[in-house]
Amino acid sequence: MTDDIAATFEPRVFSGVQPTGNLHLGNYLGAIVKFVALQETHPCVYCVVDMHAITVFQDPAELQKSIREVTAAFLAAGIDPKTQIVFNQSRVHQHAELAWVFNCIARLGWMNRMTQFKEKAGKDRENASLGLYAYPSLMAADILLYKATHVPVGEDQKQHLELTRDIAQKFDNDYRDRIAELGFGPRFFPLPEPIIQGPATRVMSLRDGTKKMSKSDPSDLSRINLADDRDTLAQKLRKAKTDPEPLPSEVEGLSGRPEAENLVGIYAALAGTSAAAVLGEYGGSQFSTFKASLTDLAVEKLGPVGAEMKRLAADPAYIDGVLASGAERARVIAEPVMTAVKDVVGFLR
Ligand code: AMP
Ligand code: TRP
């Protein structure tokens, strides 16, 4: 049924990455690699979500640097800024406008269930920003402003995608008659589908296989950054936590072994194969052997991306040009959608 609804809309991909510090292997395998693949089959909009970033205080100069860095990572990974739209969120004011309308659609009860807010706010919830609480509503606005039908993300964003669908659904229900009357029907917004597939939808910390690899982990040894050089990468993998057993020959043998499962998943994703195929080759091997192969593979796949990011970092004018042109093209899609939303809601304009 949801597929039917998506089918009445032109397929379009939208996704976003926050410019908040080092991009890591989780961002790359969970999201960016998929962004690159999808541009072959879909028109895509890829957004550096700077408005989401400031839900937690960011140093202004660092934020500007990070916006350019994420953009450079998109381009270095192979996203084509001529055929696809790459821009930073704050340049298209309709994101903020639609987010406000959605703040009035979403229910407190829905927001209170968001696990990412609970994790990020931590124990001192009274001191979290209002923006952090409303974050998923802005994310819904990002996606629905482009009437996107498909959203490639890591596993941690699944709940936010469900909320996006709930918001789309409630908007359509609340304004059903008005939408029909204005000829925008039968549905105003699609119900976007998350694209969460493959062996690395949730890359775990190298220090603790039960924790997500994250930008905010205080230990840099917990993650592989896209910008890490060969020695750093090799050292991090050498130090990565494992268990004393050799690798199993079957996927079932990974259960209860989160660190082994994580490294095998990373290998599979980098090699473009499955965990079963990796174990077919390395079943029975010691971690020392497997880690050495994984290091070679990671250097082979990530090295060129890191090198291209460095090259682009030396050319901020080029990056800024990409973002400005992307924002212009994003506005062409966003403007009429926001205008129609205003008419639906009953704003005079
Ligand atoms: P963020 O850096 O939070 O903006 O995340 C950008 C994208 O990377 C989102 O699609 C996340 O779901 C994805 N992502 C972040 N961390 C991981 C991880 N450890 N494993 C897989 N995907 C991740
Ligand atoms: N919340 C996402 C994250 O932390 C980033 C994001 C913002 C996003 N807007 C989006 C992802 C729209 C997909 C679609 O990873």
Image (cartoon, helix red, strand yellow):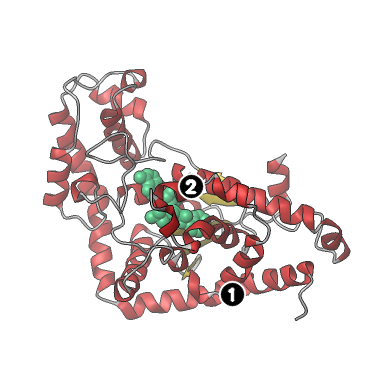
What is the C-alpha distance between the residues marked 1 and 2? 25 Å
Residue 282, placed above or below residue 158: above
> Does the image show residue 33?
no
How crowded is the residue under tag 1: few (<14 C-alpha within 10 Å), some, or many (20+)?
some
- Comparing 20 with 327, the one in front is 20
Tell which of 177 and 11 is nearer to you: 177
Left or right of residue 17, residue 66 in this image? left
Answer yes or no: is residue 211 visible: yes
The numbered mark, 1 or 2, whose residue comes first in the sequence reads 2
In the rendered view, does 4 fall on the left or right side of 295?
right
Q: Which mark is residue 157?
A: 2
Type of the residue with mark 1: Arg
Where residue 286 sits, quadrant-wise, is top left
Tag 1 residue: 331
Report whether 155 appears left or right of 211: right
Is residue 348 depicted above or below 340 in this figure?
below
Give residue 22's quadrant in the image.
bottom left
